[in-house]
Amino acid sequence: MLVMMCGWQTTEEIGDPGNTCTWKQTPKNSGPSATIDFIVKKTGQKQIYHVGHSQDTLIAFAAFATNPQLAEKIKINFALAPIATAKYVTSVLRFTCYIDPQLFKMANKGTCQAYDWGSPSLNILHHNQLTPPLYHVEDVRVPTAMWSGGRDILVDPIDIKNLEPRVSNLIYHKKIPSYNHLDFMLGLDVYDQIDTEIIMMMNEAQ
């Protein structure tokens, strides 16, 4: 069983169909937790596999680091173009960080933290503390396999290099020199480069 949560929306059976899981939402809330709990309950499986791309890997890292009960339900976390920080993004996409103060802070500080709601009172409302909490990737105990691209202008190789030793249960990391950020979803050879390896790891984990 795979859980793909890249730009997903919750269904009516889980919650408001208009809800979209974004970084503004707390990763511990009804987004990933409700979806995974729903699938586990419906399938009767004790553990499932999680596949994420880009921002979803960020949400997954945060959720699994702060919710051990949720993390126990994941057999392997497959992270495509994984993001934990964006400090070394040098492309024109970095300028979009200036539009969103939260992205600006994460880009400049190189931190992985919850959404900053802009005031202590709002942060208390959403996080129960004055400032947004930091998420520690090191606390993720879920076995994690990663695939990164050499031509990815959003997930810089330096950020990936810094992320790699922080993933405490990293079981595999493949660097694909020719891949950009979208090739993980749309690449003509994605089946050979990634899909077959994911299927092989799933079969071996049975």
Image (tube, rainbow, N blue to C red):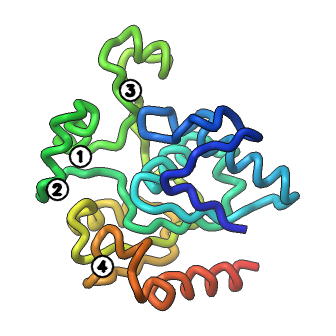
Q: Which residue is mark 2?
A: 88
Q: Residues within 10 Å of mark 2 (few under 14, many from 20)?
A: some
Tag 2: amino acid: Tyr
Q: Earlier in the sequence, mark 4 or mark 2?
A: 2
Task: Identify which residue is drawn at 61% across, 41% down.
Answer: 67
Say whether disc 2 or disc 1 marks the residue closer to the N-terminus.
Answer: 2
Circle 3 residue? 132
Helix, strand or loop at label 4? It is: loop
Tag 1 secondary structure = loop
- The three-letter code of the residue at mark 3 reads Pro
Q: Is residue 93 left or right of residue 121?
A: left
The type of residue carrying mark 1 is: Gly
Quarter holding residue 154: bottom left
Mark 2 vs 1: CB contact within 8 A: yes
Residue tagged 4: 179
Q: Are marks 4 and 2 in contact (CB under 8 Å)?
A: no
Q: Is label 3 in contact with label 2 (beta carbons under 8 Å)?
A: no
Mark with earlier residue (4, 3): 3
Structural distance between the alpha carbons of marks 3 and 2: 22 Å
